[in-house]
Amino acid sequence: MKIAVLYGGISGEREVSLSTGKGVIQALINKGHEVKGIDFDPGKLDEVLNLDVDLVFIGLHGRFGEDGKIQGLLDMLNIPYVGSGVLSSALAMDKAKSKQIFSSQGIQTAFSRTYVVNQFEKLSDIVMDVKANFSIPFVVKPNQEGSTLGLTIVKEEQQIQKALEVASASDSVLLVEEYVGGREVTVPVVGKQGEEEALPVIEIIPKNDYYDFDSKYKPGGSEHIVPAKVSEDLTKQLQTNAVKAHQLLSCDVYSRVDFIINENNIPIILEVNTLPGMTPTSLFPDSAQVIGWSYDDLIERFVTLSVTDKK
């Protein structure tokens, strides 16, 4: 097949996307496809508008890649692509909206409040509301951003203003939620709609206080334990909730669902990643390898599912 791979982009996750794109391109070439790589820039849409390919593999992360915008453009151009469509991409990217959906359907979430910055006269008004509704520690983050960019775990009252400033540099909508300590795990989900399966659960042991950008992407930043050393019952619960979350957002082909297992052994969902990191050493391929799927086979599986799903 003739496949275009969109990677790079202009979000804060550009460097990760460059690695994802490089890995995907090589895997597709290894599988015999004719591949065109495009370092995507919304200011140079001609590269996409003039595409003559059978399929697009979106290797972008964050804004203009994971939020439904590029999916909408490809839909209008009638070009099939790998992964979730406009609505599910946008919902998964909007942490507050997706949490409301999960909570309403019995998947446990952390208590949170959303703040639209321009609805307040000054940031100090948000500080007052946060103080009234949260006790330390708690988390402040942009509502739509990935890879923990703009995230602060507030441990002292004097950090609140700065945490809000950092988050508001990335987004006009801020999410403040209670801090949930515990074990960080993630569950890859793959399959055509209605027939999804969860892959082995991965436990992430970050070298820093939490699974931040450096832990995710710097060599030795974290340790991945696959399959996670959790009970059979908890494994089943995590995998069931991951597939349920994926389906609630109408995700397609693949996603990765992040959880914290709290001190009472209850999984608290964090988010669904519709375009998780897909470098050869990323979490998703790590899990797939445990059940005998090589990196190249995994990428080819996504392509096959996309072609059969969207005919």
Image (cartoon, helix red, strand yellow):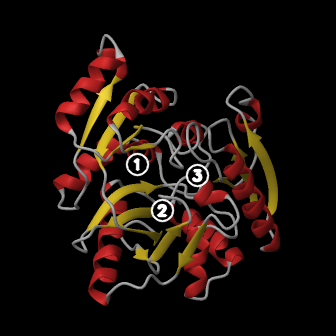
Is residue 262 positioned above or below 41 on the image?
Answer: below
Q: Are marks 1 and 2 in contact (CB under 8 Å)?
A: yes
Q: Which residue is mark 2?
A: 255
Q: Earlier in the sequence, mark 3 or mark 1?
A: 1
Q: Which residue is mark 1?
A: 92
Q: Earlier in the sequence, mark 3 or mark 2?
A: 3
Is residue 224 positioned above or below 19 on the image?
Answer: below
Q: Nearer the viewer, residue 98 or 270?
A: 270
Q: Nearer the viewer, residue 149 or 272?
A: 149
Q: Are marks 3 and 2 in contact (CB under 8 Å)?
A: no
Is residue 69 in view? yes
Classed neighbour count for the residue bearing mark 2: other residues with Cα under 10 Å, few (<14), some (14–19), many (≥20): many
The dot on residue 279 is none
In which quarter of the view is residue 20 placed? bottom right
Inspect the image, locate mark 3, and give the three-letter code of the amino acid beneath it.
Phe
Is residue 1 in view? no
* Location of the N terminus (image quadrant): bottom right
Q: Earlier in the sequence, mark 1 or mark 2?
A: 1
Inspect the image, locate mark 1, and give the three-letter code of the amino acid beneath it.
Ala
Give the image location of residue 289, x and y in percent. 61, 83
Give the image location of residue 33, x and y in percent. 79, 66
Indicate which label's residue lies in the foreground, 3 or 2. Answer: 3
Classed neighbour count for the residue bearing mark 3: other residues with Cα under 10 Å, few (<14), some (14–19), many (≥20): some
Q: CA distance from mark 1 to mark 2?
A: 10 Å
Is residue 105 positioned above or below 159 on the image?
Answer: below
Q: Which residue is mark 3?
A: 213
Inspect the image, locate mark 2, and give the three-letter code of the amino acid beneath it.
Ser
Q: CA distance from mark 3 to mark 1?
A: 19 Å
